[in-house]
């Protein structure tokens, strides 16, 4: 640490040029020594005056050429400055460096002032300062996406600028994309993480500096190859953070027309904490609760507590804001937003020769709230009015019961006992009775649909286009499946619910309509395929995730205004949806339809990420099979001397000027 | 000769006001010398004047007119009554006309001439024997011996003829002078004493001459307070000697100390040998110098 360390800043010919300066100064000095002749009455006294000065003439010469020595000292200082003397910080290993800088939400924590990200940037800049001219470095910032801020360059100025420009995001962390970008040059030809790739170009080994708090998932298949990883752990060990893990609203089941809000609050500190949670509606305080949170558990799980707010007033729309009154390291997770939008009923068209079970299920109050259902005979499909409406996407969902259109409409569809005129086909003959083996409980269409007590007389097994998901599987094959179609989804049920003989006699193919699961199935279909928001609150979106918006009437574009009051024009995609991807900021986004000024809907972006809220830096980052241990960066920065040297040079310059002007000699 | 009829030379050297001022003055000698002619000064010689000097026994051949008969009546022995003779005073002005004297504004030489003219004029007014010479004056062409106010014109003319550039050493010049002029009297040496061989030898010649010596050390402001700067090559105007200096505050201080010690040394040397020493700058007007400083020194009265 005490030994000075030098970084040569010039090439040999530049040094050569610099080396010419001192002889030039000396030459100029000798030119200057051509003293001006001055005739005097007598040199008698002068000779005697300078006589004793000649006694130690070497020192006298030194004194007389003080200016020369000051100038040489100045040049020497400047040359020394160009060697960039300093005390070595952490040494940079290797010749090529890749700096990965975590910009995820947790890096905004203020435990290391001013923030972890700023600390990381400072350390990266310090490392960049230590680079030798022949070194090259690359800067990548990553959250869940990676951004190559600066490809390999040896320009420290450029690197510094780029690092300076890196700003915090609210996104979660994911290292894999950044690693893929980083390994591009180090492990050429490795298009994926698979080892079987053939190397095509010369590998350029590099040192990979990861500046992160470790809140990243493991990257299982990654092979480091020629990368030498160094994980610089950011952040303090002891953490104080309280986070809102989720926040949602729902209709109060006990008091219809009123809503209640739920929040899950987590404590990442080692000690019990109590916080005050305040709920605001459109910035007006509604309610506040004091919540005591248990300490962090033994397994590292956070201590959690729930909060429930009941609102007596009927809220139709507005923004609910939950604020935790706590001063912890990460402020982003102390506020959560939930948007209560006016319910927008889905437009559903049922084309059926007659299906009382369906009519009954769609005629309930609950269904009327979420859907605007119209019924039509199959002969409607022949009319031009239908064709126009279907083409322009006037419906959210069309249910084709025992009939099929010639061309598919621009919306989601549910086919009952018929196959859509696309890639769908019968896997086998109509047979029965099928035995239901499994129901997909994860898919929203079949969530909570229990088929165990449902008897079906006959059904047709189905195969759909690529990407089709089997929802209900029977021994004869899938009998309820959903498949994609250019932005829409088609669900197909392989059996009739109610049929009518040509004579008009009602025949029953299944007892499903009288089972409890049938209305659930219908509601699921309307909610999911009709695009109805499941609860009063719009779903919360995580930062960086795209928000899929729908409008009641089709417009060409909607305008989304971010919490930062930036406006984005979002054009219409297929299926009457608008996909807004720039959900970087936390908060409430206003959506205006078309050119109108009225805010038609809102959606909220909340952090809700336990991994980001858990500020405790991880000791180890898993990169493929390799565990990279974190090192706390102490003395990372190189102590530079050149500023002081330049100051000294300026001082010498001023001194020289003073002596030159004032004729002061020692 | 009336002052207003004097030529241009007079106007340069002596102004009418100065002449009027000088007329009232008188040269004073601290010693009593023998003069050459009858004059206004007391002389060592016994002669005819009103001032009694001594008695002496009569020896045959003495002029009977000087016998003190009153004393003969009382003592019955013949005594001669001796009176002091009044004779002229010899005034010599020796001007250093070396090249180094050609510096200053006015030049030191001009100043020296002016001074010599002033003192010479005083002497002329008092019927003294005035002789002005420069150091380089050769024995073949000695300076004129002047007497009487009418000689003012000749004195000034001669002074005009003295030009700088007579580079003889001080000692040699003084020696030549002493050889030429054996008489006693007042000697005013006007010089800058800038001789690399030193002034001591020259002074000793003067001491040996047993004259009433006044050394008027003339220096110009450039020597007293040199206002030069930068890196300079100082060239001696007499012998082309070169001194390279880088002017700095300490060097100037050192120069001034050297100058002061030089002046002190000269003063002490002169004083110890009964010579009167006066350092003057060319900035001092001749009137002030003669009327005040030389008066205090006792050269003039």
Image: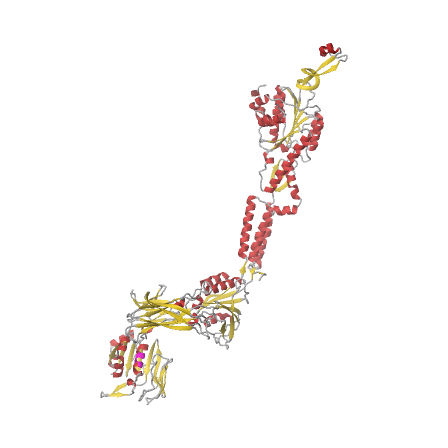
Of the 4 image quadrants, the one containing the N terminus of chain B is: top right
Majority secondary structure of the magenta segment?
Answer: helix
Residue at the far right: name it: B60
Along the line of sight, which residue is nearer the eye, B44 or A250? Answer: A250
Whether residue B290 is situated above or below residue A142 in the rendered picture: above
Position of residue A560 measured from the top left corner of the image (x, y, whole percent): 34, 67
Q: Which image quadrant for residue B15? A: top right
Q: Residue at x 56, y 62 (%)?
A: A88
User: Does residue B199 sit above or below A199 in this rendering?
Assistant: above
Q: Where residue B299 sits in the image (x, y, percent)?
A: 63, 25
Quick one: A574 or A273, which is closer to the camera?
A: A273
- Locate residue A236, reporting x and y percent: 48, 67
Which residues, given as a range, are shown in magenta?
A520-525
Q: With respect to residue B134, does A299 lie above or below?
A: below
Q: Is residue A193 left or right of residue B281?
A: left
Please name whichever residue, A186 or A602, is drawn nearer the observer in this view of the structure.
Answer: A602
Kindly tell me whether residue B296 is visible in this rendering. yes
Position above or below: B145 against A599: above
Q: Is residue A524 magenta?
A: yes
Query: Residue A200: in sight, yes or no?
Result: no
Please tell me how many numbered marks the rendered image carries: 0
Question: In screen coordinates, is A140 left or right of A400?
Answer: right
Res. A541 image quadrant: bottom left
Q: Residue B45: x, y in percent?
A: 71, 18
The colour scheme used here is secondary structure
Q: Is residue B203 magenta?
A: no
Viewer-proximal residue among B191 and A586 = A586
């Amino acid at each position: 640490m005490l030994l000075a360390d030098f970084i040569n800043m010039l090439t040999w010919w530049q040094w050569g040029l610099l080396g010419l300066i001192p002889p030039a100064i000396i030459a100029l000095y000798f030119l200057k020594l051509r003293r001006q002749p001055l005739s005097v009455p007598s040199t008698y006294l002068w000779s005697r005056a300078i006589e004793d000065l000649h006694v130690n003439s070497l020192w006298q010469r030194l004194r007389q050429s003080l200016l020369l020595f000051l100038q040489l000292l100045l040049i020497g200082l400047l040359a020394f400055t160009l060697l960039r003397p300093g005390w070595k910080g952490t040494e940079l290993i290797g010749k090529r460096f890749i700096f990965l800088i975590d910009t995820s939400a947790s890096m905004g924590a203020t435990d290391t002032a001013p923030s972890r990200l700023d600390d990381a940037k400072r350390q990266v800049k310090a490392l960049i300062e230590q680079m030798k001219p022949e070194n090259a470095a690359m800067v990548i910032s990553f959250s869940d996406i990676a951004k190559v801020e600066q490809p390999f360059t040896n320009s420290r100025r450029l690197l510094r600028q780029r690092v300076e420009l890196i700003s915090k995001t609210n996104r979660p962390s994911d290292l894999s994309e950044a690693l893929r970008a980083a390994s591009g040059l180090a492990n050429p030809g490795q298009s994926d993480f698979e080892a079987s790739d053939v190397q095509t170009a010369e590998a350029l080994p590099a040192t990979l500096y990861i500046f992160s708090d470790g809140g990243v998932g493991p990257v299982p298949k990654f092979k480091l190859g020629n990368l030498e990883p160094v994980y610089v752990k950011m952040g303090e060990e002891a953490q104080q953070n309280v986070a809102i893990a989720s926040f949602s609203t729902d209709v109060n089941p006990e008091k219809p027309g009123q809503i209640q809000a739920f929040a899950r609050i987590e404590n990442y500190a080692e000690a019990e904490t109590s916080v005050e949670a305040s709920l605001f509606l459109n910035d007006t305080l509604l309610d506040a609760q004091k919540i005591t949170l248990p300490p962090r558990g033994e397994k590292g799980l956070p201590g959690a507590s729930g909060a429930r707010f009941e609102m007596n007033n009927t809220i139709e729309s507005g923004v609910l804001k939950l604020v935790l009154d706590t001063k912890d390291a990460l402020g982003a997770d102390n506020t959560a937003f939930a948007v209560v939008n006016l319910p927008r009923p889905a437009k559903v068209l049922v084309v059926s020769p007659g299906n009382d079970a369906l009519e009954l299920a769609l005629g309930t109050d609950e269904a009327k709230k979420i859907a605007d259902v119209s019924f039509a005979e199959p002969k409607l499909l022949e009319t031009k009015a239908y064709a126009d409406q279907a083409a322009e996407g006037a419906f959210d969902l069309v249910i084709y019961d025992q009939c099929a259109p010639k061309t598919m409409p621009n919306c989601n569809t549910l086919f009952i006992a018929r196959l859509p005129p696309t890639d769908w086909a019968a896997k086998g003959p109509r047979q029965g009775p099928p035995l239901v083996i499994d129901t997909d409980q994860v898919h929203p269409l079949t969530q909570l649909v229990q088929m165990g007590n449902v008897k079906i007389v006959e059904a047709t097994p189905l195969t759909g286009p690529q990407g089709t998901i089997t929802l209900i599987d029977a021994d004869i094959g899938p009998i309820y499946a959903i498949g994609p179609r250019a932005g829409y989804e088609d669900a197909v049920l392989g059996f009739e619910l109610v049929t009518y003989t040509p004579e008009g006699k009602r025949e029953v193919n299944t007892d499903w309509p009288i089972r409890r699961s049938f209305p659930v199935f219908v509601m699921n279909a309307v909610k999911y395929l009709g695009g109805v928001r499941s609860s009063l609150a719009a779903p919360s979106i995580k930062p960086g995730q795209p928000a899929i918006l729908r409008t009641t009437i089709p417009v060409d574009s909607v305008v989304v205004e971010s919490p930062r009051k930036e406006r984005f024009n979002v054009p219409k995609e297929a299926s009457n949806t608008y996909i807004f991807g720039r959900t970087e900021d936390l908060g409430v986004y206003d959506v205006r339809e078309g050119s109108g000024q009225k805010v038609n809907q809102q959606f909220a972006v909340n952090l809700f990420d336990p991994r980001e809220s858990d500020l405790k830096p991880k000791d180890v980052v898993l990169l493929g099979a390799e565990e990279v241990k974190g090192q706390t960066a102490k003395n990372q920065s190189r102590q530079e001397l050149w500023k002081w040297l330049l100051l000294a040079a300026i001082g010498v310059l001023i001194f020289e000027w003073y002596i030159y002007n004032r004729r002061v000699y020692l | 000769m009336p002052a207003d009829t004097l030529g241009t030379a007079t106007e340069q050297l002596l102004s009418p006001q100065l002449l009027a001022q000088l007329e009232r003055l008188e040269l004073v000698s601290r010693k009593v010398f023998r003069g050459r002619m009858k004059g206004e000064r007391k002389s060592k010689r016994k002669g005819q004047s009103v001032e009694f000097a001594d008695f002496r026994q009569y020896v045959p051949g003495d002029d009977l007119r000087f016998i003190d008969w009153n004393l003969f009546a009382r003592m019955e022995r013949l005594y001669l009554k001796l009176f002091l003779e009044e004779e002229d005073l010899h005034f010599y002005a020796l001007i250093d006309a070396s090249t180094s004297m050609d510096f200053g504004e006015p030049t030191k030489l001009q100043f020296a001439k002016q001074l010599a003219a002033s003192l010479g004029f005083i002497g002329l007014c008092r019927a003294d024997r005035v002789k002005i010479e420069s150091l380089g004056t050769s024995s073949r062409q000695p300076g004129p011996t002047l007497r009487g106010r009418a000689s003012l014109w000749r004195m000034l003319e001669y002074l005009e003829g003295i030009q700088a550039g007579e580079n003889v050493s001080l000692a040699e010049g003084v020696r030549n002078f002493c050889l030429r002029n054996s008489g006693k009297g007042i000697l005013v040496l006007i010089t800058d004493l800038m001789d690399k061989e030193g002034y001591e030898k020259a002074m000793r010649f003067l001491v040996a001459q047993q004259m009433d010596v006044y050394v008027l050390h003339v220096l110009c402001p450039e020597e007293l307070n040199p206002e030069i700067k930068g890196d300079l090559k100082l060239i001696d105007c007499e012998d082309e000697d070169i001194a390279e200096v880088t002017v700095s505050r300490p060097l100037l201080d050192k120069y001034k100390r050297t100058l002061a010690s030089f002046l002190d040394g000269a003063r002490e040397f002169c004083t110890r040998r009964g010579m009167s020493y006066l350092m003057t700058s060319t900035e001092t007007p001749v009137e002030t110098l003669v009327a005040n400083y030389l008066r205090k020194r006792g050269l003039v009265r």
